[in-house]
Each structure stands twice: as structure tokens, then as C-alpha cells.
Amino acid sequence: MSANEEPPRAESPAGEEEERPPGAGDIPEHEIVKMEDIITIDPETMEVDLNHGRIAKIENLEPLTKLERLCLRWNLIKKIENLDHLTSLLELELYDNQITELENLDQLVNLEVLDVSFNRLREIKNISALTKLRQLFLCANRISLIENLDNFSSLTMLELGDNKLRKLENLDRLTNLTHLYIGKNKITKIENLDNLVKLECLSLQCNRLTKIENLDKLVNLTELYVSENGIEKLENLEQNKLLETLDVGKNRIQHIENIGHLQALEEFWMNDNAVSEWSCVDQLAENKKLATVYLERNPVASDVNYRRKLKLAVPWLQKIDATLCR
């Protein structure tokens, strides 16, 4: 890693950058592939993987009544259809297609994982029958409202990053949720999360937050990512004593404060803020498990003795700004 490398962002399971096959999305009609041309029907098949197939329509899967996993990443599918008979299906992956609506899923009552990231969805709807869902990926669509999730008490992971959301709402029934990703939206306030008491990872990067607040009930939180917002103060983390990773990079914070009680803290990412006083940096000595600190592009980082001073303040540091300590 270079000295200028930024700390890694919170991993968003459906949000990795991948290169689509050449010309995908703009394929001449004669080049579009039909599923019947590439599937060798075996009624005993439990998994079908048809990535990069230039497939335009879901069809001809009727014999596969034992199918548990269907993967159709990077195709040209515009409509979810012809899946009613796949009642044994546990995982359906339609990542990166051209789907505009969630529909025709009512019969997939055993489905545990649904991934429709990188499509053209505007609404969360027509999935109330999927009560066994554990993971739902809706990243990179055009969704403007969190809704219709009341039936998903078994859900442990929800990915809503890179949409058009403005408010955290309608999540009360997701009482078993452990991972919530809602980065790259237009959310202005942390709110309405009190019922998510099992939450371990909360990612709200790249939104419009100005304050860390309303996290008191999330006592099991181990990872909090709120970088690239407009936050001005480190505060209101008194009850989040299990935090191991705290990412507040690229905000407007001037002081390191109110985190001495975070005795489990190992990763503290505070690059690109406004910390100018070494006296507050010294407070990191209270965090005895701290292994990694990012403070680059803060005023204190311009000190010629920056790394030495930081290491003296926290002798047990293993990494400073992506560079291992000697």
C-alpha cells in the first residue's frame, strides 16, 4: 500500500465494481442468446450459473424442480418471470440486468437470498411472500423509499446503497438484522433504528448527515461507517462500547473526543478532517486495542514529526495511514 492510500470503505456485498462484457446493454437482436440454446436440462441439477450470457428472457427452466441456486448476473433480462415452479429455490441472483420491477416472485417461498442490485428498480414491492429471506441486495437502483419490508423478520442483511433514499424509515420489523448498508444516498439524519438491536454493522457513508445520533439502542454495533458526510463532532457513542471499527473520514470534525470508552476499538479512520491540535490526538492513548489510525490530510498530519508523535502517543499502533509501523 502507498502512503497516500485511503482506508478501505465498508464492504458492501453487492457493490463491488466489475467490468461488464463488451457491448452489454446494446446487443443486436441476432446476438441475443436464448436460455434453451445453452442449458443442458438435468432434472437433478441444484445450481445453474449463466453469467455473461447475453440472455434476454428467463425461460425453459420448468424441468429443474430441484434447483436451489439460480445465477443470472450480467445479462439483458428486463422482466422477472417464469419462475413459479422453482419452489425449492434458495438463492436468486439477477445482479446487473435491466429489470424495472420486482414481480412474479410469490411462489419462491423458500428463497433465502435475493440479489437484484444494479438494475432499474424504483420501488420495493411484490416480495411480501418471501418471508424466509435472510439477505436482500437492492444496491444501485433508483429506489426512493424504504417500504414493504414488514414481513422480513428473518432478514439479517439489507443492502440499499447507491439509490435515491432520503430517509431512514420503515425498518422497525427487521429485528434480526445484523448488517445494514445504505451508503451513497441522500439521507440527512440517523433515526428510526432503535428496534435493530442486533445490528453489528451500519454503513451510512456518502450521505448528507451532519450529526452522529440516535445509536443508543444499538449496543451490539461493532462497525460504524459514516465517512463522506458533513459531521462536525464525535459524539453520542456512549452506548456503543463494542465498536471495533469507526470510520468518520472526510467529514468536518476538529477534535478527537468522546471515544476513550471504546475499549474494543481497533480501527479508527479519521482522514480528511480538521484536527489541528496534538492535545486531542493524545486522547487515543485511552484506546488500548487500537491497531490502525488514519489521520492523513488533517492539519496535524503536516507536522514533520507526525508519525513519530502519533506513535509516541499510542505506542501499540501497528499501522498509520496505510503504512505499517516499524
Image (cartoon, rainbow, N blue to C red):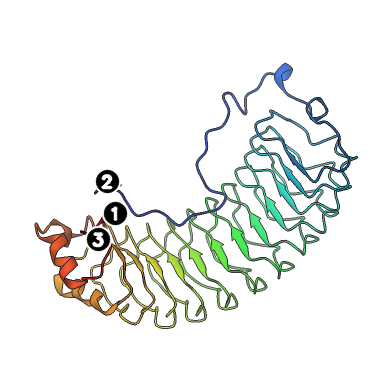
Q: Residue furthest left?
A: 304
The front one of 229 and 300 is 300
- Residue lying at 72% horizontally and 23% vertically, measured from the top left: 32
Helix, strand or loop at disc 3?
loop
Residue 288 x %, y %: 30, 77
Rendering coords of residue 276 (x, y %): 16, 65
Residue at the spot of label 2: 2
Local packing at callout 2 (Cα closer than 10 Å; few below 14, some 14-19, many 20+) is few
In space, the residues marked 3 and 2 are separated at their CA atoms by: 15 Å
Numbered tag placed on residue 182 in the rendering? none
SS category of the residue bearing label 2: loop
User: Mark 3 against mark 2, which lies toward the viewer?
Assistant: 2
Q: Is residue 190 above or below residue 91?
A: below
Question: Residue at the spot x=65%, y=70% of the render?
Answer: 174
- Residue 270 placed where, x, y %? 30, 63
> Contact (CB < 8 A) between labels 3 and 2?
no
Give the distance between the C-alpha atoms of the residues marked 3 and 1, in whole angstroms.
Answer: 10 Å
Q: Amino acid at mark 2?
A: Ser
The amino acid pointed to by label 1 is Ala
- Determine the image quadrant of residue 193: bottom right
**Pointer 1: residues within 10 angstroms few (<14), some, or many (20+)?**
some
Q: Residue beneath label 1, please? A: 322
- Give the total of numbered labels: 3
Name the disc covering residue 295, or none. Answer: 3
Between 4 and 213, the one lying in front of the other is 4
The answer to whether 90 appears left or right of 284 in the picture is right
Choose between 225 and 162: the one closer to the eye.
Answer: 225
Direction front: furthest residue: 326
Identified by mark 3, the residue type is: Leu
Task: Check disc 1 and report its element: helix, strand or loop.
Answer: loop
